[in-house]
Amino acid sequence: MSASLTLPAPAKLNRMLHIVGRRDDGYHELQTLFQIIDLSDSLTLTLREDGNIHLSTPLDGVACEDNLIVRAARLLQRHANTTQGATLAIDKRLPMGGGLGGGSSNAATVLAGLNKLWQLGLSSEALAKLGLELGADVPVFIHGHSAWAEGVGEKLTTVTLDTPWFVIIHPAVSVSTPRVFQDPELTRDSRPITMARALQGGASEWRNDCEAVVKKRYPQVAEALDWLARYAPSRLTGTGGCLFATFESEKAARTVAELAGQRWPAWAARGLNTSPLQDALGC
Ligand SMILES: C[C@](O)(CO)[C@H](O)COP(=O)(O)OP(=O)(O)OC[C@H]1O[C@@H](n2ccc(N)nc2=O)[C@H](O)[C@@H]1O
Ligand SMILES: Nc1ncnc2c1ncn2[C@@H]1O[C@H](COP(=O)(O)OP(=O)(O)OP(=O)(O)O)[C@@H](O)[C@H]1O
């Protein structure tokens, strides 16, 4: 076993997202189609014998103890009751708080990577359950495949989706996930549908129930969405503020990403069905 692992932590898109209810604890019941894309942070995990968890690349605006990378490592260390430690380093490329799930993905990569480095032998189910304590999107990144999700996003069924090219824009505004979910104008009563129905309907029928409220509260998101929708069908991912448009060809996506890049941070990325994390871990 090598004493160091370098692993990707990819982003996700919510190809559709319906809010079908609200639980007693305030969390919302969702129905969503998750797709992982080939846009990733990169994490390097190095074994330490002294038991310390050390983040060598702090993120601007996030205290180390709050960083999901450190929290995931400590949670696993406690859960497995191990005396092994790790030095953690991240090359951060995904925008934070944009609905691309970067923080949850970082946590999932740390859980899966340290499970291997520390030779703990925990199952994916155990890691996903542990990860859910850190964020609603951690389980799908552990699962590592396109998925239909229910509950708060943790009840996952593997699906195979089309793998188009996307243009992703991050409007220059930070959208607060709790604020969106607390908004009095958010609709929470979409009729539950079956997975088969969601898949049959296809992209032309998909929508994100957070989009209307986010557009209203964050005019910068509305402006970027109107701009992007001139080129291709476009939607909000998660609670935003990132937006994505769907293209059949890489060339068209790269052309629009370059144009968008003159106004906002923007990327062209391909939809995947298997996570590069699973490929890297060889499972
Ligand atoms: C909306 C999604 O982006 C869909 O992928 C995610 O479910 C959000 O996941 P996340 O950012 O990891 O969210 P968390 O850190 O778990 O929750 C942030 C806050 O959002 C609200 N929240 C989140 C998820 C959910 N299903 N219902 C909620 O009401 C809760 O107030 C929670 O305190
Ligand atoms: N390693 C991390 N990477 C990104 N954000 C982190 C990290 N650790 C803590 N955070 C905090 O978590 C917040 C949400 O981060 P994240 O990038 O997961 O949001 P998101 O893309 O909106 O995710 P979601 O789609 O799950 O709502 C950030 O604003 C930041 O303060």
Image (cartoon, rainbow, N blue to C red):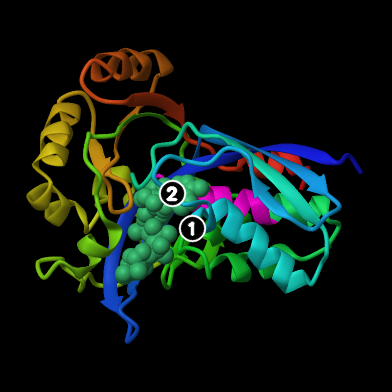
Q: Which residues are magenta?
A: 100-111
Is residue 83 visible in the rendered image? The answer is yes
**Does residue 260 belong to the magenta stretch?**
no
Q: Position of residue 233 (x, y in %)?
A: 23, 34
Q: Residue at x 56, y 42 (%)?
A: 273
Q: Secondary structure at mark 1?
A: helix
Q: Quadrant of ligand 1?
A: bottom left
Instruction: Say which residue label 1 marks.
Output: 66
Q: Residue at x 73, y 65 (%)?
A: 77
Q: Position of residue 106 (x, y in %)?
A: 56, 48
Instruction: Say which residue label 2 marks.
Output: 62
- CB contact under 8 Å: marks 1 and 2: yes
**Does residue 110 belong to the magenta stretch?**
yes
Q: Considering depth in this image, is 77 or 101 the residue closer to the camera?
A: 77
With respect to residue 232, does 59 lie above or below? Answer: below
Q: Can you tell which quarter of the image residue 43 is in?
A: top right
Say whether residue 224 is left or right of residue 268.
left
**Residue 102 numbered tag:** none
Q: Amino acid at mark 1?
A: Asp
Q: Position of residue 136 (x, y in %)?
A: 45, 64
With respect to residue 165, does 24 lie above or below? Answer: below
Query: Looking at mark 2, is its residue's CB closer than 8 Å to ligand 2?
Result: yes
Query: Looking at mark 1, is its residue's CB closer than 8 Å to ligand 2?
Result: yes
Q: Can you tell which quarter of the image residue 179 is in?
A: bottom left
Q: Residue at x 21, y 61 (%)?
A: 180
Q: Residue at x 53, y 37 (%)?
A: 272
Quarter of the image with the N terminus in it: top right
Say whether residue 232 is left or right of residue 272.
left
Q: Position of residue 102 (x, y in %)?
A: 47, 45
